[in-house]
Image (cartoon, rainbow, N blue to C red):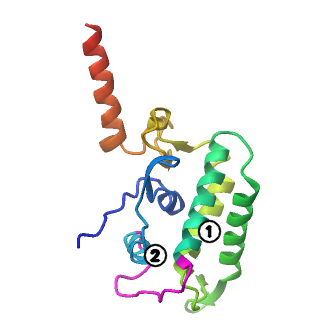
Amino acid sequence: MVKHRYDFDGGTVALDFVNTVSGMRGFEPREHLLGWEELVDWARQAGLIPARSHPRMIAGALQQALRIREALHDVVVAAVDKRDAPAEALAEVTRWIADALAHRRLLPAGKGRYQMQFDRDDNPLAFLRPVALDAAELLERDLAGGLVRICEERALGRCGWIFLDQTKNHSRRFCSMKECGNRAKQRRFQQRKRML
């Protein structure tokens, strides 16, 4: 079976996690995390789990991961749209980030050196702890700077992917020029052709 190759165009691992749904939520979304294996595969491709490790599955872990992902999506979209986040979504994201912070420890890393590391425990979603800290930074820093955007194809109901605009002049409009940007270019070309 060919595994799905995830796109990592979000600019941060937190937005790449949110973007594991293609299309538009609420209007023909395409879920890519259909089971535990897909979640683990995404985490491997994101570099969160070594290729050979495989956390054991606990009932409900996938549903919890999807609930966290959707809550993060709702909080980010609300911020981009300049409105208050849904209270339940914000509470879910806050719990997730607080849990990740509670499992971070300062450990010796050689003579006079230290390194922050996450606890190694039996939580099957422990590999999402770095994603939670990335989400915290995104929510606190990047959203405030107005650098988080939603693909322009959203206006046509075609794409709802979110990305961090890291271009020099902050003019990025599409999640990917290869997909949505190219589609928009073709549409403009066809419109000009019809006007002639």
Looking at the picture, tell me which residue is in the foreground, 48 or 161: 161
Between 110 and 186, the one nearer to me in the picture? 186
Residue at point 57% right, 91% down?
Answer: 122
Q: Is residue 82 left or right of residue 31?
A: right
Secondary structure under tag 2 reads loop
- Compute the Cα span from label 1 to label 2: 13 Å
- Which residue is identified by label 2? 48
Residue 167, image x and y in percent?
Answer: 46, 42
In the image, which disc is placed on residue 63? none
Which image quarter is the N terminus in? bottom left
55 with respect to 120 (left or right): left
Q: Main secondary structure of the magenta part?
A: loop
Is residue 50 found inside the magenta-colored segment of the image? yes
Callout 1: SS? helix
- Which residue is at 52% across, 57% downward? 15
Please state the extent of the stretch shown in magenta in the rendering.
46-61
Is 154 or 102 nearer to us in this picture? 154
Q: Position of residue 188 (x, y in %)?
A: 33, 23
Q: Return the residue at label 1.
A: 133
Q: Residue at x 32, y 35 (%)?
A: 183
Residue 142 in view of the camera = no
Q: What's the residue at 45%, 32% (across, down)?
A: 156
Q: Are marks 1 and 2 in contact (CB under 8 Å)?
A: no
Queried whether the magenta region covers residue 27, the answer comes back as: no
Q: Amino acid at mark 1?
A: Leu
Q: Which quadrant would residue 136 be assigned to in this image?
A: bottom right
Q: Name the quarter where the C terminus is drawn.
A: top left
Using the rendered image of the protein, determine whether residue 60 is visible from the camera's viewpoint: yes
Q: Give the percent coordinates (x, y) of residue 21.
A: 45, 56
Residue 95: x %, y % from top left: 72, 71
Q: Amino acid at mark 2?
A: Leu
On screen, residue 149 above or below 189? below
